[in-house]
Amino acid sequence: LQIVVGRKVAASISPPSRSVTGRPSRVVSMPAEVRNLGNAEDQFRILVTAPSGWNGTVYLDENGDGVRQETETQVLTQTPPLPPDSVLKVVVEVTVPADTRSGTAWSVELAARPLEANTALASATYIVNATTVNTTVALSAEPAQPEIGSLVRLTAQVDPAEEDTLQIT
């Protein structure tokens, strides 16, 4: 009796779906895992399909924490060789265009394909819900009742506090 086991090429992406919130002109990050479900070591092409005008990139999540660090700069268009049942952790980043309307939802797809074929073995769909955040600015002056010609110190409290630049003219 002779049993011949053929090569099986298979992959999965998890999570298979996710919904996130994104602000116009901002980057949205989504952690994902690509798993080799085949019975041999394989490599897979990694593709991001985003709406027109959106930029999508897949980065290797070197420390596996699900968050892209400044030092994690390796862009992936294909996986390294993955042994059977091994997992590669990645971070998918898309930039929400500046003209995206609040309240709209957009679909971004992450796919894994065999190197030698165009058929998708696995895919995941991420829904980016565009939203805007109302920013409030509270100004205070010290002293509260300045004399003519005196030095006044203005303080601005921005909520939510972010890396945005506040310009006062």
Image (cartoon, rainbow, N blue to C red):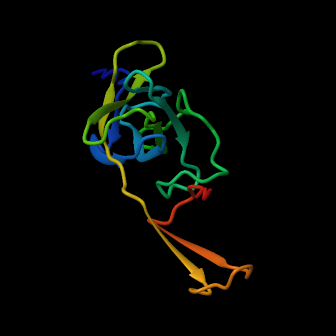
- Quadrant housing the C terminus: bottom right
109 is higher (above) or lower (below) than 151: above
Q: Position of residue 51 (x, y in %)?
A: 37, 25
Of residues 4 and 168, the one nearer the viewer is 168
Identify the residue at image location x=62%, y=87%. Answer: 143
Identify the residue at image location x=44%, y=44%. Answer: 86
Q: Position of residue 129 (x, y in %)?
A: 29, 43
Identify the residue at image location x=35%, y=24%. Answer: 8
Q: How many marks?
A: 0
Hey, which residue is sitting farthest front in the picture? Answer: 148
Of residues 123 and 166, the one nearer the viewer is 166
Identify the residue at image location x=39%, y=12%. Answer: 118
Of residues 9 and 51, the one nearer the viewer is 51
99 is higher (above) or lower (below) than 134: above
Hey, which residue is sitting farthest top in the picture? Answer: 117
Query: Which quadrant of the view contains residue 63?
Result: bottom right
52 is higher (above) or lower (below) than 167: above
